[in-house]
Image (cartoon, rainbow, N blue to C red):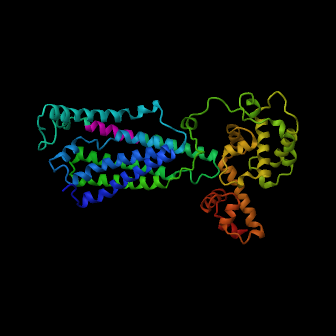
Amino acid sequence: MFFGFNIYSGLLLPFFLQGVIVAAVLWARRRREDTAADGWLALLLLLFAVRLAQWMLGFAGWYDSHDSRTTFMFYWPFSNWLAVGPALYFYFRSLTNQEFRLQRQHWWHFAPALVVLAWLLVVFGYDLGWWHGLQGRPLPAHFGTKGPLASWADYQPIGLLADTLGYLSVLAYAVHTLRAYRAYARYLNDNFSDTEQLRFRWLRNVLVAVVVGTGVTLVFGAVNLFITPLNYVQSWYDYLFTGLLIYYLSISGLLTGYRLAALRFQLSADIAASPAPLLPPVEAAAGASNIVALETSEKIVAPAVLGLPETSVSPVVTVASVQSVADATVEEPTETAAEPDAELTRWTTRLLAHMQTARPYLEPELTLGELATQLRTNTSWLSRVINSGCGQNFNDFVNEYRVREAERRLRDPQFRHYTLLAVALEAGFNSKSTFNRVFKKLRGQTPSEAARQL
């Protein structure tokens, strides 16, 4: 029988087939839509599926068939943990930066995995190419299905060393990627007003699952090596966990949307501090084409700011300070740059006036780049204005306006017949779930609770 079905091989087979089929679908989508992340996820799925295949085929009788199938089991690279960590890391990089592509300097991450594959190729070439193929000598081990070099390697610590280094590699890459994920979360809050579809919380769970899965494999290996040898059935549960991981990766990857062209997360820029301080647009105008010339709108800011209602002013900026700065902004800019604090305050005033008059927060997918374009400045300076001048990140800053807009509509009798979803959409939120989460975060209660009190 080509494949022996039993409870052990039969339970692993669906996970293996799902991993291979979904990997093929993801690879086709990668070629069709030029989404590099799909390619990395396909590689991850194949690595886990191939690892699972060793125990699945073993329980299906391939080790005991004493033919070419048995020889295949001895020479195929079923497990290469040294490739899992880099693949997971580059999947994260591609998912969070749509412009990321593998460069020549990135290949060193896969050097250890390639060394393992090269060693297996040497063993295969010697045993089946030189010993059995060219010299015509029979394979000496396991009923004539295993060559001399593969038999010798079984008694050497080569496989144990490669697996141990692989486990450590997966843990190191997973921890590093989790740190990068935290930096990515800060990047989202600083650049996007609607982050629900961009947070990839499932990816964080995948990272944790990979760490747990590697830990499970380490425990099985330690028990087998130092406590008591495990039989094939006892080790089978380790591979069952790999099957569950394949299932989770498959579903998550297929459901991930790629309308994310705005994602430009740069890992080094988010983790490492910038060595040079940010300059206000007036000071950087000579070297940046996307910086504003302040003369075009200085005079219209003052009257707009003087009439700002209380709800349009950030808690960090008082009405009195805004009014005093507004009077100062009527003056024409001079050749000498203003003091950094004064320039920051002036731009904070300008930003608040724009939020009040243009109401850009009503656009559900407003980004920092779009708001910077409206103000004719750059994202670095605008981010500093929001963080330092308003005391918030971009996400909280914009959503504060949306929550206030929702509260205004909930108080207005003409909106009494509106559902909470309608109020959320009218206020600039993209979904009711985002509305509930943000409202709870900023007000400490749900929108429905607030509506009952108004």
Q: In the displayed structure, would residue 208 be above or below residue 414?
A: above
Residue furthest bottom in the image: 417
Residue 164 within the segment the image draws in magenta:
yes
Locate the N terminus and report the quarter of the image it occupies.
bottom left
Residue 320 in the image, given as x and y percentages of width and height: 84, 47
Horizontal side of residue 102 vs 57, given as left or right:
right
Give whichever of 318, 153 is nearer the camera: 153
Q: Decide which of 115, 206 is in the foreground and name it.
A: 115
Of 154 and 224, nearer the camera is 154
Q: Position of residue 98 (x, y in %)?
A: 54, 43
Give residue 426's quadrant in the image.
bottom right
Magenta stretch, overall SS: helix
Residue drawn where x is 72% and y is 35% of the image: 290
User: Could you tell me if residue 235 is visible in this image?
Assistant: no
State the residue at coordinates (76%, 66%): 411
Magenta-drawn segment: 159-172
Residue at left offset 49%, top offset 55%: 255
